[in-house]
Amino acid sequence: MKELWKLYITPKANNPKVRNFFIRTLATAFLLPVTFLVVWTGGWWLTVLITICGVLGGWELANLIANHNYRPVKFICSIWSGGLIVAVHFYLNDSGFIITVIPVMLSIPVALLVFIFFDMGFKNESLAHKVIHMSNSLVVNSLIPLIVGGLLSFALFLNNLQGGRDWIYTIVVVVAATDVSSYIFGSLFGKHKLVPKISPSKTWEGGLAGLTFAIVTSVCLYYLFDLPGNLGLLIGFGGLLYFSALVGDLLESTVKRMVGVKDSGSLIPGHGGILDRMDSILISLFAGYLFVLWTID
């Protein structure tokens, strides 16, 4: 028995892929119930959770793509990502769009411009270079709160729809099923690289498994939650979530490859940063909301 343990179990336990898989699984087993509980509670609890994710995700994305090393700029990108989510919360609770979302969106470039202008790094540049540098920094950095906070806000828009809580559950579970199945089947059977220059670990075999599980999970949740619409729509919904999750994942992988990092952070054991967990969810929330709004709600 000891020989079998040494021969089979120990090598597998010391295998980095196996160890990483178990760490990822444990982290997911903790995070999913917490997320489900907060979504079930709704209201300010949901807004607080999404805002925290927005602040942390905004900071990580700023660390990756902000073309300005002035630290306050990263704080602005982070805080305004969360601020945009809070503004959407007030808007959906019968406050005017002009007095909630618009001021936050307008204040993002204004705040960035102030800090970028006073950055010591611009002092030795000519006026023309200073204007070009400031314009580029302003555009790129202003996109960060809009990408992170803006896309996460669609969870609140979804929650505001009829049966919105069930739709959020469906998106989270389908994306999680896609991620897990792609990882497992890709690790076990993957031989043909999907996009080797962007994400070498992704394979066609894992992608096919992810698409299959996305559709099957979507159909199962259709019956479990008694979702509106018909079976055909939910099959399409599963396929849409798979491809939107894949696009989000590949976009983040492209950014990380461009800046030469493996993970966006180290906040979540086995997963990396919070942005590494949210990359698939961000576009899926947006795509899922539009799908439900236009075809079902």
Image: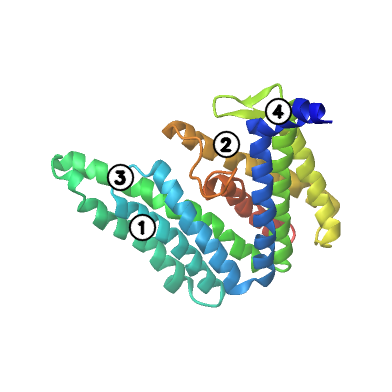
Question: Where is mark 1, residue-wise?
Answer: 76
Label 4, on which residue? 11
Mark 4 nearby-residue class (10 Å; few <14, some 14–19, many ≥20): few
**Label 4 amino acid?**
Pro
Q: Position of residue 261 (x, y in %)?
A: 46, 35
Is 256 in front, or is 158? 256
Residue lying at the far top of the rendered structure = 191
The residue that mark 2 highlights is 250
From the viewer's perspective, tell me whether residue 187 is left or right of residue 233. Answer: left
Please rate how many residues cluster around mark 1, counting C-alpha atoms within 10 Å: few if below 14, some from 14 to 19, many from 20. Answer: many
Which quarter shows the N terminus?
A: top right
User: Residue at coordinates 72% horizontally, 26% vertically from top-left?
Assistant: 190
In primary-sequence order, the first of circles 4 and 1 is 4
| Circle nearer the N terminus (2, 1) | 1
Q: Amino acid at mark 3?
A: Asn
Residue marked by disc 3: 69
Q: Nearer the viewer, mark 4 or mark 1?
A: 4
Dot 4: element:
helix
- 295 or 25, which is in the foreground? 25
Label 2 and label 1: CA atoms lie apart by 26 Å
Name the amino acid, label 2.
Answer: Leu
Residue at position x 40%, y 48% in the image: 62
Q: Is residue 233 above or below residue 9?
A: below
